[in-house]
Image (cartoon, grey):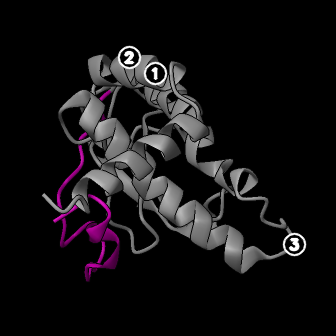
Amino acid sequence: MSAHDVYDRDYDGPESGPELECADCGSAMELVPAEESQYGRPFFRCWRFPDCYGTHAAHPNGYPVGTPADARTRALRKRAHDALDPLWRDAPLLYGVDALDPKKVRIIRGRARRRTYEWLEERLGQPAHLGSADAALCRRIIFACSRATPESIRAWAHAREAERNAPF
């Protein structure tokens, strides 16, 4: 099962799923529903808030995304996303897709995102789910992405496809 399959799983809230421990202070974490979130989506926060600012992302169904991390690792995960996301998010520009056609943009971004994560996992030799990445993996992701472009990942994917379709 991939890390993204969890999104579709039935989940009745934190009572039926894993208990989360705040990586900053060790206290339990509570699910904040989307209606109470300033971001419009659910997330976990430390029970000691506002004395502790430990947080963790949640899927729309309330299931945790990956594993909680301390403040330093959360900052590195954000930097890793900042390095990785433009590699797939800007893919429609390679195809000259009109930004006013949201269906085409969504399809191309979806393919490019999948391709980018496959490229990254091949480079790292391990799964690259940022919600579970430790500090060392985040640094490796940032480094790998600093040397890549959307064009280079697209070329990698085309070469891989040609290799898979080779007659011998």
**Which residue in the protein does label 2 denote?**
139
Residue drawn where x is 28% and y is 16% of the image = 136
Q: Position of residue 107 (x, y in %)?
A: 59, 72
Task: Please identify the dominant SS of the magenta region.
Answer: loop
Q: Find out whether residue 119 is within the magenta segment.
A: no
Residue drawn where x is 64% and y is 52% of the image = 91
Q: Position of residue 59 (x, y in %)?
A: 42, 65
Helix, strand or loop at label 3? It is loop
Instruction: Specify the label residue 142 is tagged with.
Output: 1
User: Which callout, 3 or 2, points at the residue further toward the start of the chain?
Assistant: 3
Residue drawn where x is 38% and y is 68% of the image = 62
**Residue type marked 1:** Ile
Q: Of discs 1 and 3, which sits in the foreground?
A: 3
**Which residue in the protein does label 3 denote?**
100
As displayed, is residue 98 above or below residue 161? below
Magenta part of the chain: 1-23
**Residue type marked 2:** Arg
Q: Which one is nearer the viewer's eye here, 145 or 149?
A: 149
Q: Which one is nearer the viewer's eye here, 60 or 27?
A: 60
How crowded pointer 1 is (Cα within 10 Å; few <14, some 14-19, many 20+) is rated as some
Measured Cα–Cα span from mark 3 to mark 2: 36 Å
Q: Do the residues labelled 2 and 1 touch (CB within 8 Å)?
A: yes
Residue drawn where x is 41% and y is 58% of the image = 58
Q: Position of residue 16 (x, y in %)?
A: 18, 73
How crowded pointer 3 is (Cα within 10 Å; few <14, some 14-19, many 20+) is rated as few
Helix, strand or loop at label 2? It is helix
Q: Is residue 92 found left or right of 44 in the rendered image?
A: right
